[in-house]
Image (spheres, grey):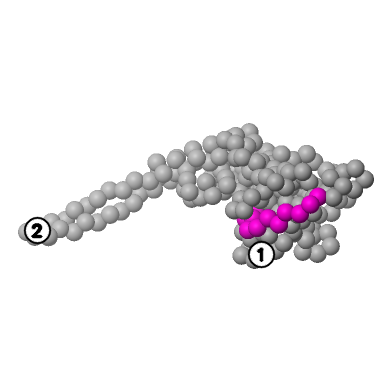
Amino acid sequence: MPPKRNPAAASPQPCGIDFRASDDDGWYGVQLCVERGDGDGRRLRVMYCDFPEVCDETFTSGGFADEEDLEEFSRRFRASSGQLQDWECGEVVEGMTVCASYAFGEGDVRFYDAVVEEVCFSDHKIIEGDEVCTCTFVLLWQHGPNAGRKTSTGIEHVCLLKQRSKLIDPALDLFLELSRKSIKSAGQGSCKFYIILKLGPGLRFTCVQSLTSL
């Protein structure tokens, strides 16, 4: 998990993709690049936006057990969610999943997925000519320290998820393809042979042994 945000530690970077960190399950804006790894392998560098380089994470193309493991990893990436605007509150309905922020302390604000349990609409205010939403949203948190709990929040803490496109980021797409090839190659390197021993009429013993090419 990246340390708490320190604005002086890095310059702001434009981010169009979010990554759910494995340590705290929070969503963070990131940039991605594919680098040469050990041997013929490649690695994906996940660079957290507005965090120092020491917070970067790397993943190797040969580090996934199978397709299911890789698919679970790919679901940790998605297009960056958009802040819900005051005039958009009507788009939020019960049962939909949103990305919402929660403050755990001063300067410690993190984003997690939550399901909208209830929308409490109220008349909007006009302040200095601008429309201000005063509705509240009851959220059931899906990840993080509040997972399974319900809290109420205002529109300023709610972000709308974007539809997942097939190609989220060229670097991610390339890394996933290389990882699939690595999994397929590892699978072709293993084979099984069977030894059947006849022990008598109607009886036999089957021995299964696996060989893995080095």
Residue 74 vs residue 91, the one in the foreground: 91
- Looking at the image, residue 114 sits to the left or right of residue 4; the answer is left
Q: How many marks?
A: 2
SS state under label 2: loop
Residue 10 appears in the rendering: no
SS state under label 1: strand
Q: Residues within 10 Å of mark 1 (few under 14, many from 20)?
A: some
- Looking at the image, residue 29 sits to the left or right of residue 39; the answer is right
Task: Please check the rendered image and state whether residue 114 is part of the magenta-colored stretch, yes or no.
Answer: yes
Residue 96 vs residue 34, the one in the foreground: 96
Q: Which residues are magenta?
A: 111-124
> Picture coordinates of residue 139 (x, y %)?
67, 59
> Picture coordinates of residue 96 (x, y %)?
61, 50
Task: Please check the rendered image and state whether residue 191 is part of the magenta-colored stretch, yes or no.
Answer: no
Q: Residues within 10 Å of mark 2 (few under 14, many from 20)?
A: few
Amino acid bearing label 2: Gly
Give the vertical position of 31 relative to 96 (above or below).
above
Residue drawn at the location 18% of the way across and 59% of the way down: 205
> Picture coordinates of residue 87 (x, y %)?
77, 43
Residue drawn at the location 59% of the way across and 53% of the way down: 95
What label does residue 150 carry, if any? Answer: 1
Q: What residue would you read off at disc 2?
A: 202
Residue drawn at the location 47% of the way across and 45% of the way down: 67
User: Based on the displayed image, in which of its 4 quarters is residue 104 positioned?
Assistant: bottom right
